[in-house]
Amino acid sequence: MVSGRRERPRFSRLEEDAVRDFMDKAKDFANKHEKQVDQAVRKAGDMANRRTGGKYKDQIDKGIDRAQSRTGEGDQVR
């Protein structure tokens, strides 16, 4: 460890391939089911806002918008 920075864990080629495969499948799923994914993201964001008493509403909403933009439904009206 140098100057307080953590080293990244090293993964085997097999582990890297497995993670890459999982991410590709997740992206495919999200693209095929955009509406459901966007609804789930919105619902999770609403719950996070309720649980934090709205304290982080701006940050949560920004995260929701970024997530939804990746599935093509980012400009939904709230």
Image (cartoon, rainbow, N blue to C red):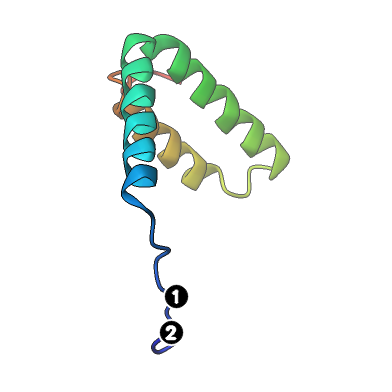
Q: Name the residue under label 1.
A: 6
Mark 1 is surrounded, within 10 Å at the Cα level, by few (under 14), some (14 to 19) or many (20 or more) other residues, namely few
Q: Is mark 1 on a helix, strand or loop?
A: loop
Of the numbered discs in the image, which one, if any, rests on residue 1?
2
Viewer-nearest residue: 65 or 8? 8
* Outermost bottom residue: 3
Q: Where is residue 32 in the image (x, y as percent from the top left)?
A: 33, 10
Identified at 36% across, 53% down, the residue is 12
Q: In this view, does 56 lie above or below 25?
A: below
Viewer-nearest residue: 12 or 24? 12
Callout 2 amino acid: Met
Q: What element carries label 2?
A: loop
Q: Quadrant of residue 31?
A: top left
Q: In which quarter of the image is residue 53?
A: top right
Name the side, left or right, on which 49 lies relative to 36.
Answer: right
Q: Are marks 2 and 1 in contact (CB under 8 Å)?
A: yes
Quadrant location, the N terminus: bottom left
Q: Quadrant of residue 65?
A: top left
Of the numbered discs in the image, which one, if any, rests on residue 14?
none
